[in-house]
Amino acid sequence: NVKNEQTGQWEKVPYFAIDDQFPYGHGEKSVFLIERKMRLKIEEAMAIRWHMGEFGDKNSNTISQAYDKYPLAVKLHLADLESTYLREKGTSAVK
């Protein structure tokens, strides 16, 4: 709830909170959880680890090395960008 400064009344507003019980990092956590059920090739692990590129990663100084060595990581990141910003938002003529 938030107090409306003009009316002085409390109003309900939508919100959400995240309580991450395993704050391991998005890409790292994905690799960790998958590896609990199946083995990944190094190239697959690197692609999953870096699929979001530098978004939300404070220690991204190794991303260039990963992309140079593992082209699959670049491809998965590009696919993630296309899915997020073009296909899911409905802003692309790509079908």
Image (cartoon, rainbow, N blue to C red):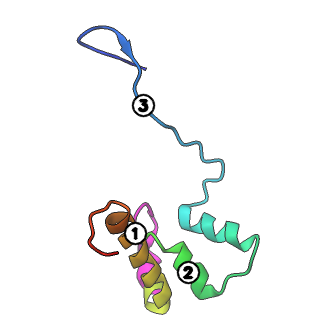
Looking at the image, tell me whether mark 2 or mark 1 is earlier in sequence order: 2
Q: Indicate whether residue 57 is drawn in magenta.
A: yes
Residue drawn 58% across the image and 87% down it? 43
Estimate the spatial distance between the alpha carbons at disc 3 and disc 1, rounded to whole Å.
Answer: 26 Å
Kindly check if marks 2 and 3 are in contact, taking CB atoms under 8 A apart as contact.
no
The amino acid type of the residue labelled 1 equals Ser
Q: Nearer the viewer, residue 1 or 27?
A: 1
Magenta region, residue range = 54-65
- What secondary structure is found at the residue carrying circle 3? loop
Is 85 left, or right, of 31 in this rendering? left
Q: Residue furthest front?
A: 95
Residue drawn 68% across the image and 82% down it? 40
| Residue 44 pos. (x, y %) | 59, 83
Q: Which residue is mark 3?
A: 14
Q: Quadrant of residue 49?
A: bottom right
Estimate the spatial distance between the alpha carbons at disc 2 and disc 1, rounded to whole Å.
Answer: 19 Å
The amino acid type of the residue labelled 2 equals Met
Q: Is residue 43 visible?
A: yes
Q: Which residue is mark 2?
A: 46
The disc label shown at residue 92, or none: none
Q: Which residue is mark 1?
A: 83
The amino acid type of the residue labelled 3 equals Pro
